[in-house]
Amino acid sequence: MQKKIHLAIIDADIPAPALYAARGLYSAQFEKILQKAVTQLSHIKEYEKYDIKLHVTAYDLLAGVYPPLEHLRTTTNETTKDDPIDAILITGAPPGAYETDKYPWIVDLEKYIRHIFDKYPCVRMLGSCFGHQVIAQALLPNDVIVEKSLLGREAGLYTIQTDPAFAKCFPILSTLPYGVTLQMMHGDWVISRSGRDTNGINEALSANLPSPWM
């Protein structure tokens, strides 16, 4: 049984010239990583029956180009022949998600995120670094704060311990007994507003996002 996934990647930044010359746009870098992951999944017993195929389309946010609404998945009954967009990934970018006065396009991006979340429940959204932060800011303005980390920058490999309820949604995480190791390079964070306001930073760091966000 073939399962085709159409992923739209929104390039929120253009890499530095040397990095661009070596690796291309962030969307191209993500596609290489994700295609490799799809290949690895095909060798795992629980997933090999799906014959997963990944198709990626890139969009230039700095030019104001977004995935067209008419191309987004609206029902689970649409066929792979229709090739609707199943998910949207927003890449990293130098601005802080909170710098809306300096970068007014962030406001437009937040409006787009909210519209997708409200009107297209079949479309998944995920973000990397800035992308993750702007999604949180757009959808949870009363619950979280996006700001410069008061603990400074994180750079290098960090092992993340996943919340059991979160891990339950991704069974493959159960095969990683020591957590998920990720490459970090950022100075901002998304932190619980209530935990920070009432109990200080340490309490906020251990506070979950409101259900069902974990």
Image (spheres, rainbow, N blue to C red):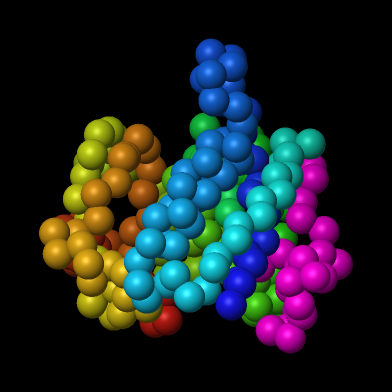
At 25% from the left and 34% from the top, the residue drawn is 156
**Residue in the image at 56% along x and 44% along y:** 31
**Viewer-proximal residue, 43 or 54?**
43
Q: Is residue 168 above or below residue 129?
A: below
Q: Position of residue 162 (x, y in %)?
A: 24, 66
Counting every numbered tag in the picture gives 0
Which residue is painted at 71% across and 49% down in the image? 57
Q: In screen coordinates, is 125 left or right of 162?
A: right
Q: Nearer the viewer, residue 159 or 129?
A: 159
Query: Looking at the rendering, in which quadrant would you find the N terminus?
Result: bottom right
User: Where is residue 182 shown, x and y percent of the image?
Assistant: 29, 46
Q: Is residue 87 visible?
A: no
- Quick one: quadrant of the C terminus? bottom left
Q: Which residues are magenta?
A: 64-87
As for residue 73 lying within the magenta part, the answer is yes
Percent x, y of residue 74: 76, 79
Residue 13 at what x, y percent from top left? 61, 33
| Magenta span: chief secondary structure | loop
Q: Tell me what residue is drawn at x 65 percent, y 79 percent.
A: 121
110 sits left or right of 186 in the view: right
**Which residue is more in the foreground, 85 or 160?**
85
Task: Locate residue 125: give its quadrant.
Answer: bottom right
Instruction: Look at the picture and state if 159 lies above or below 84.
Output: above
Assess whether residue 67 is covered by the magenta stretch. Answer: yes
